[in-house]
Image (cartoon, coloured by chain):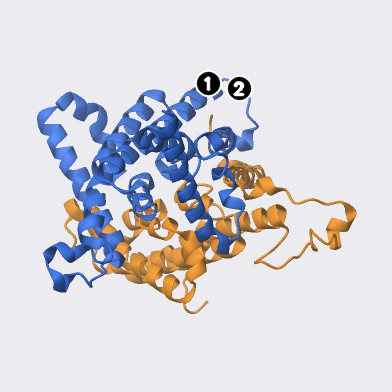
Chain colours: A orange, B blue
Amino acid sequence: MGLLSKKDAVLLSDPLADNNPITIQVLGICSALAITAELKASIVMAVSVIFVLGLGNVVISLMRNIIPSKIRIIVQLIVVATLVIIVDLVLKAFAYELSKTLSVFVGLIITNCIIMGRFEAFALGNGPWRSFLDGIGNAVGYGVILIAVGFFRELLGSGTLLGFKVLGDSIEKTGLYALGYENNGFMLLSPMALIVVGIIIWIQRSRNTSLIEEN
Amino acid sequence: MEHLELFFKSIFIDNMVFATFLGMCSYLAVSKKVATAVGLGAAVIFVLAVTVPLNWLLDQYILQDGALAWLGEEYAQYDLSFLSFIMFIATIATMVQLVEIIVEKFSPSLYNSLGIFLPLIAVNCAILGGSLFMQSREIPTLGLSLTYGVGSGIGWFLAILAIAAIREKIRYSSVPPALRGLGITFIITGLMAIGFMSFGGMLTGGDEEKKEEKPVTEVAIKKKIEKTSAKEMVAENTNIN
């Protein structure tokens, strides 16, 4: 742990569980749900957010003393928008099909509440290195939930993971399908994303009762 | 007819919250009381009605491939669409600020009820999402873009109103402790979204609800088919009338 002091390590690990951006802070739900029908799209989205939030936090933190507080929102939006344009162009160049699937949701990273939330709450008051760790920590916390939701939706919905038929072939009735197992097509529809996240929250709060809210 | 179709489509079928999950953050955060939910919902309708047509003009006359042709022959080759994110978000942030100032000046009572929500709205995904969907769905005229903006705003308003009413009532029921608050809200929203899916076949003859099941490669083709079938629908309907 030469590189990270104990305080810095908390910045990274805290958002992964007890202060998770999605399940506890309720930030960044918008983009989290719509694109999780496939694991691959979830992973790409998670990586994009890690890139944007990590770098954006550093940029904002470096500029924190010269941004006039009255126009800080617009400055933050411009920084995020620039980073998101980079992500969008890279996706269009190297993964065109995928960028079509993600459609407008790449652009919506700009208004992802996690990003603005971390800029406001952390990067404006802390140094670049700590802001970087905070950004990475929160983005990974977001990514973990995204990937978990994507994993279950793709596995139960189409019986594949990253496009590989892990449960056997549903048409030729091999693997699990030979036993009469059927894909639950409902998992691919958007409402199930909400219910899967709801169940994740349920499990997390049953394990850690201090997180339970008052009604 | 075209306006009416787009209007109902954007309210019910492509509902911002239930079909595309836009604006979920403020939807979850500000839905504890009906009164505040109404305030935020009204502000969203208002801002969407202003920003979507404005961004349509930007898209049409500045950003699209060849849109600068009105400046002269030599500008026709430019394609500035990669700038659309930054242009849209800047327009939205500016408009929200402007609207806030104007409302504060001319109608203090409206400002008191809407004002506190306006800064929140600049970073509401529903607003940017409205403009981005307007661009990706290639809405053809300024009038239609206004209809689309107002329609999606009303859809969002309906959604937040409904969940706020349910959350006010659910305080009196015994929810499992670990699900209280956020968890149950997610699950209720999921159930409501399933309900809203039943609007799916209303205007497009059942095309719409299969959209998500289609494999990646077919999405583009599917969109084309949808478009033509929607046009045919319009043609048929006008013939009948």
Regarding residue B240, the answer to whether it shows in the image is yes
Quadrant where the N terminus of chain B is found in the figure: top left
Which chain is mark 1 on? B
- Front residue of B219/A194: it is B219
Q: Is residue A19 left or right of residue A114?
A: right
- Rounded to the nearest angstrom, the CA distance separating label 1 from label 2 is 8 Å
Q: Residue farthest to the left?
A: B105
Mark 2, secondary structure of its residue: loop
Tell me the residue at 71%/53% (across/down): A156
| Picture layout, residue A106 above or below residue A184 | below
| Residue B50 drawn at (x, y percent) | 23, 41
x and y, in percent, of residue A151 in the image: 65, 58
Q: Nearer the viewer, residue B231 or A85?
A: B231
- Residue at coordinates 58% horizontally, 51% vertically from top-left? B212
Q: Nearer the viewer, residue B219 or A158?
A: B219
Task: Spot the residue most to the right.
Answer: A179
Q: Amino acid at mark 2?
A: Ser
The answer to whether the residue labelled 1 contacts the one labelled 2, judged by CB atoms less than 8 Å apart, is: yes
Label number found at residue B169:
1
- Residue B49 in percent (x, y) is at 27, 38
State the quadrant of the C terminus of chain B: top left
Q: Is residue A49 above or below residue A203?
A: below
Closer to the camera, A169 or B168? A169
**Which structural element holds mark 1?**
helix
Label 2 environment density (alpha carbons within 10 Å; few <14, some 14–19, many ≥20): few
> What residue is shown with label 2?
B173
Which quadrant would residue A58 be assigned to in this image?
A: bottom left
Q: Position of residue B41 (x, y in %)?
A: 35, 32
* Chain containing the residue with disc 2: B
